[in-house]
Image: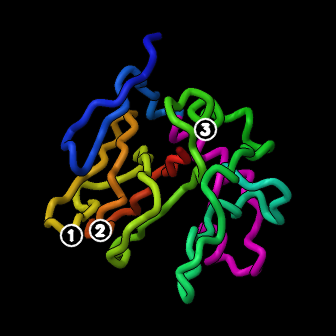
């Protein structure tokens, strides 16, 4: 296999990882394996089970399933809570899944590797991230998009490709469709 490289779709917004075609059926299977193994949320509330899901974690994390689901910045003070490179550990309970194979094949160093669901009608506030974020769509619909302050939108299809978004620019994400949008996201650590 050739070494994966980045190809720019729109030099300001999105790059695609070239030379790395992932198997979407295996990605969906890995997601089902994740759900089967996922412990209940610490709150004990069923509605919290699918919140803040991570595949990577920091050393000594209290909850390796949800450590990567935490925000990088304290919303009140604006101070950094951690560095992306701290998420250097992959969940041992998932090392036999396709997600681990993806993690090992990345042409960049990933920090937080997360599973993010946007339910129908959900939208994120406009924000910037400290690092670019790679997306792989697991489940989506045409009306689920990332929105940049410029007005540009981008739909990540379930094409088995890694789409690296320039989340250093102001952006949001919304799901105006009738089904959940589920993405595997990976924050670039370098």
In the image, is 144 to the left or to the right of 30?
left
- Residue matched to label 1: 149
Q: CB under 8 Å between callouts 2 and 3?
A: no
Asked whether 34 falls inside the magenta stretch, the response is yes
In the image, 175 versus 164, the foreground residue is 164
Q: CB under 8 Å between callouts 2 and 1?
A: yes
Earlier in the chain: of badge 2 and badge 3, it is 3
Q: Where is residue 10 in the image (x, y as percent from the top left)?
A: 19, 43
Q: In this view, does 103 lie above or below 41?
A: above
Q: Give the range drawn in magenta.
A: 27-55
Q: Residue at x 73, y 32 (%)?
A: 96
* Residue mark closest to the camera, 2 vs 3: 2
In the image, is 90 to the left or to the right of 18?
right
In the image, 57 versus 139, the foreground residue is 57
Q: CB under 8 Å between callouts 1 and 3?
A: no
- Residue matched to label 2: 170
Residue 99, which numbered label?
3
Tell me the CA gap for discs 2 and 1: 6 Å
Asked whether 29 falls inside the magenta stretch, the response is yes
* Residue mark closest to the camera, 1 vs 3: 1
User: Badge 3: few (under 14), some or many (20 or more) residues near its Cα, within 10 Å?
Assistant: many
Residue 176, which numbered label?
none
Q: Residue at x 32, y 75 (%)?
A: 126
User: Badge 2: few (under 14), some or many (20 or more) residues near its Cα, within 10 Å?
Assistant: some
In the image, 87 versus 37, the foreground residue is 87
């Amino acid at each position: 296999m050739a070494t994966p490289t980045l190809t720019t779709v729109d030099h300001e917004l999105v790059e695609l990882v070239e030379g790395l075609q992932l198997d979407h059926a295996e990605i969906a299977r890995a997601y089902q394996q994740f759900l089967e193994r996922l412990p209940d949320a610490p709150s004990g509330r069923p509605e919290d089970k699918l919140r803040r899901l991570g595949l990577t974690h920091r050393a000594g994390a209290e909850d390796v399933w949800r450590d990567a689901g935490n925000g990088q910045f304290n919303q009140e003070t604006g101070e950094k809570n951690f560095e992306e490179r701290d998420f250097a550990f992959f969940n041992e309970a998932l090392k036999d899944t396709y997600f681990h194979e993806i993690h090992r094949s990345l042409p960049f160093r990933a920090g937080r590797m997360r599973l993010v669901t946007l339910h129908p009608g959900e939208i994120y506030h406009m924000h910037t991230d400290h690092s670019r974020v790679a997306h792989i769509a697991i489940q989506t619909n045409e009306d689920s998009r990332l929105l940049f302050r410029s007005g540009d939108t981008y739909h990540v299809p379930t094409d088995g490709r890694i789409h690296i978004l320039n989340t250093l620019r102001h952006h949001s994400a919304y799901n105006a469709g009738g089904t959940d949008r589920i993405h595997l996201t990976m924050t670039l650590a370098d």
